[in-house]
Amino acid sequence: MALLPGAVEEAFATLPIAGGSVEFEPDLLGFGYRNRHTHMFADVETQTLNQTLLGIPVEIRVNPQSFQWNYGDGASRATYEPGEPMPESWQGETVVKTNQETLTSHVYTETGRFPVGLATTFVGEYRVGGGPWIVIPGSVDVQASPGQADIWRVAARNVSGSCRNAVDWGCNGPVTLEPGDTPPKIFADQYDANGNWLGD
């Protein structure tokens, strides 16, 4: 048993820990606007793994402790909260999901598609035979499955009257596509293969 703590510490560094994934609001699929808050969160859980070390059955529990975000635009930061999906309303007010600051949101200053990376730092503890949990020294960083932020600009103009022609500005879909653009995931079913809006 005297050698067990060292064996546990060595095993902790190589355990098949699931790093989780970068997630966005389910109804936005990574869609966001330039110069507004884009909300994302880590979908990751505490995990318990059973190992046999030195012939002894050992239960190892790993807990996510911190999160290192890489937003794909050159910015990064660490948080101690994984975040979570936003509610539909808060204190009686509707939550504007395309511009709500959260503990894990980020403001992009340019348009484009940005790969969002995440490394989760896990700390661990172990026990033998249902005994007390014992802290494992150190921590392990595990990469999460990345996500993609799809950031667009907002354009507004004054118009007179209702749409008469689908090619007129403001009449060609929820997002006006420039040559070479593809629609955001949340609107993809509203455009044909050539980027033409299919209408209501």
Image (cartoon, helix red, strand yellow):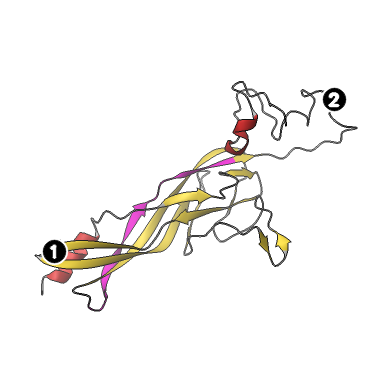
Question: Camera-side residue: 131 or 151?
Answer: 131
Q: Which residue is mark 1?
A: 53
The secondary structure type at the circle numbered 1 is strand
Is there CB contact under 8 Å for labels 2 and 1? Answer: no
Instruction: Judge whether 129 appears above or below 77 on screen.
Output: below
Residue 138 badge: none
Residue type, label 1: Leu
The secondary structure type at the circle numbered 2 is loop
Q: Quadrant of the N terminus?
A: bottom left
**Quadrant of residue 187 within the rendered picture:** top right
Q: Position of residue 110 (x, y in %)?
A: 62, 40
Residue 164 badge: 2
Q: Position of residue 169 (x, y in %)?
A: 79, 28
Question: Camera-side residue: 25 or 148?
Answer: 25
Instruction: Judge whether 95 appears above or below 130 on screen.
Output: above
Q: Residue at the spot x=47%, y=64% of the render?
A: 80
Q: Position of residue 137 (x, y in %)?
A: 26, 69
Image: magenta residue range:
131-150
